[in-house]
């Protein structure tokens, strides 16, 4: 039963996500701006002219494109999907993306999320949480996510924005010095300010009117959808040997985020 | 009758996507872990059925978890492969066209070689004949490193050979392209890249190293199974998988 529910979520969310005035808002200089999303009747007409096999084939190609791109955790732009894979099938794009989302969900346990509805970028989120004791990937990826969690945690506890010096100082206390090459992370500063930023876990923003220029960090779009604030708070509480409720502000935010996201899901199911 | 996928299947598939290829022991372990995690029934002799269920859903997507055999250690492996075309299509999103040209050249060098290997010098020299973009030496070396990192090639002391995953995934491609030049193992009748060759010029049969190890085990004087000439090569040890040698 839960299976069916999940399917309907991914189906309807991929439909709901699209604003109607899409062609007006997109002002990129690539060919995405030229793309007007076909209407339902256009899609139906397009499907009539294609065999089911052709649609399957194209869906499989789009799906593979997502999987390959996602390995690097870089957000996937709709313009790139169009240019590299969809090509002549743009008239049935909504149908293809709907089927892709459904298969990603049913077969791979991945959820397709549009993180930026203006520039149309997607990421894949793992719906199967890494269960405890599952040591399938204890490689460098996991160490990196440990570091990421620390940084996200600090930002969250400090109210959403943190100057970079504060992060570097904290990491130094944890024996991760940005001045030195780290055994597991290599160039730590590059990892945090470039890789995590590119993957949209973090945002690295210039603070206006600073001389010399200073930067601050906040959560990126991927972190917003993929990382649970409740979990982060629990982790931080554990480190302080305290209860999560002791940070009333953060506790409120973590749990309100939880309820709005579940509301969003339930409303899109209607 | 194909079974429905549940989260244990999905988790297994995710692990296959991360790893690309796993040996038999690791596959069995992953199967166990996935079933434990999602409280589903795990029958140790049903790994293949479990994988068949996943494959039934992967088939329309032109993907497959394929069983194959490693030339290096003689072990069964499972690799997640693309079956869309017999070409190197999946790599096209990770590698530029001219890089794939060089990869094809490398495959060719390896296939036609006696040893199943191509030296970095040979690969570097082959770039001169490329009609597409001319690659600099440093670019070629960088590309070879990437191909090793992405588990398409393996490298030992400057010699490159096809990885187990590459052989499993590319076998249809290699069979179509190099039908004439392909060598078959006299013992297991699979394609042989890295192997020993009978030195009798009228015989020249090939045997995989792990097959050599098994075939000549307990034989006092190794003789070619085809022409009965003396087998002059060093007989390798039988590879012991870690989990069985405990």
Image (cartoon, coloured by chain):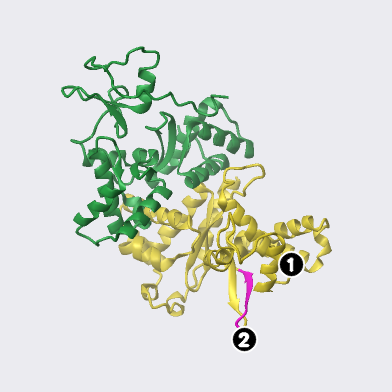
Chain colours: A yellow, B green
Q: Which residue is depicted at the point 59% across and 76% down? A: A205
Residue annotated with mark 1: A157
Q: Is residue A203 left or right of residue A77?
A: right
Which element is circle 2 on?
loop
| Percent coordinates x, y for residue B136 in the rendering | 29, 61
Which element is circle 1 on?
helix
Label 1 with label 2: CB-CB less than 8 Å = no
Q: Is residue A227 left or right of residue B156?
A: right
Pair 1/2: label in front? 2
Q: Is residue A43 visible?
A: no
Picture quadrant of residue B60: top left
Residue annotated with mark 2: A211
Q: Nearer the viewer, residue B126 or B211?
A: B126
Q: How many marks?
A: 2
Q: Residue A252, relative to residue A70: is it above or below?
A: below
Q: Earlier in the sequence, mark 1 or mark 2?
A: 1
Q: Residue B188, relative to residue A156: is it above or below?
A: above
Label 2: how many Cα within 10 Å (few below 14, some 14–19, many 20+): few
Q: Is residue A172 visible?
A: yes
Q: Quadrant of the C terminus of chain B?
A: top right
Q: In the image, which residues are magenta?
A: A210-219
Q: Quadrant of the N terminus of chain B?
A: top left
Q: CA distance from mark 1 to mark 2?
A: 27 Å
Picture quadrant of residue A245: bottom right
Of all chains, the one bearing label 2 is A
């Amino acid at each position: 039963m839960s299976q069916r529910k999940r399917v309907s979520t991914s189906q309807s969310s991929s439909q709901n996500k699209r604003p109607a005035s899409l062609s007006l808002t997109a002002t990129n200089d690539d060919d995405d701006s030229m793309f007007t999303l076909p209407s339902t009747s256009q899609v139906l007409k397009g499907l009539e002219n294609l065999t089911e096999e052709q649609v399957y084939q194209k869906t499989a190609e789009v799906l593979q494109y997502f999987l390959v791109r996602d390995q690097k955790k870089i957000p996937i732009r709709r313009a790139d999907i169009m240019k590299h894979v969809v090509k002549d099938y743009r008239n049935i794009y909504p149908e293809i993306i709907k089927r892709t989302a459904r298969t990603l969900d049913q077969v791979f346990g991945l959820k397709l999320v549009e993180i930026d509805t203006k520039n149309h970028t997607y990421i894949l989120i793992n719906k199967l949480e890494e269960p405890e004791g599952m040591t399938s990937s204890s490689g460098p990826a996991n160490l990196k996510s440990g570091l990421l969690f620390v940084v996200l945690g600090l930002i969250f506890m400090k109210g959403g924005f943190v100057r970079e010096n504060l992060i570097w100082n904290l990491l130094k206390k944890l024996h991760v010095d940005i001045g030195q090459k780290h055994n597991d992370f290599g160039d730590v500063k590059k990892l945090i300010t470039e890789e995590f930023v590119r993957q949209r876990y973090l945002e690295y923003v210039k603070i206006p009117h600073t001389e010399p220029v200073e930067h601050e960090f906040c959560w990126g779009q991927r972190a917003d959808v993929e990382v649970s604030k409740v979990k982060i708070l629990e982790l931080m509480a554990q480190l302080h040997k305290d209860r999560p409720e002791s940070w009333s502000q953060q506790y409120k935010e973590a749990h309100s985020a939880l309820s709005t996201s579940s509301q969003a899901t339930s409303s899109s199911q209607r | 009758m194909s079974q429905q996928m549940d989260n244990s299947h999905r988790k297994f598939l995710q692990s296959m996507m991360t790893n690309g290829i796993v040996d038999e022991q690791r596959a069995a372990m992953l199967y166990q872990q996935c079933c434990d995690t999602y409280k589903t029934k795990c029958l140790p002799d049903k790994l293949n059925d479990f994988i068949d269920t996943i494959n039934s859903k992967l088939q329309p997507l032109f993907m497959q978890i394929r069983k194959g055999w490693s030339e290096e250690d003689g072990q069964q492996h499972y690799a997640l492969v693309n079956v869309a075309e017999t070409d190197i299509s999946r790599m096209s999103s990770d590698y530029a066209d001219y890089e794939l040209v060089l990869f094809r050249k490398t495959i060719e060098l390896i296939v036609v070689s006696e040893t199943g290997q191509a030296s970095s010098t040979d690969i570097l020299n082959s770039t001169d004949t490329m009609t597409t973009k001319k690659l600099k030496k440093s670019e070629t070396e960088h590309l070879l490193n990437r191909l090793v990192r992405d588990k398409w090639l393996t490298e030992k002391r400057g010699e490159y050979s096809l990885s187990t995953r590459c052989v499993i995934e590319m076998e249809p491609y290699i069979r179509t392209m190099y039908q004439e030049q392909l060598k078959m193992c006299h013992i297991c009748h699979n394609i042989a890249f890295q192997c020993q060759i009978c030195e009798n010029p009228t015989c020249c049969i090939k045997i995989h190293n792990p097959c050599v190890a098994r075939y000549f085990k307990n034989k006092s004087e190794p003789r070619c199974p085809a022409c009965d000439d003396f087998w002059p090569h060093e007989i390798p040890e039988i590879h012991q998988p870690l989990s069985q040698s405990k």
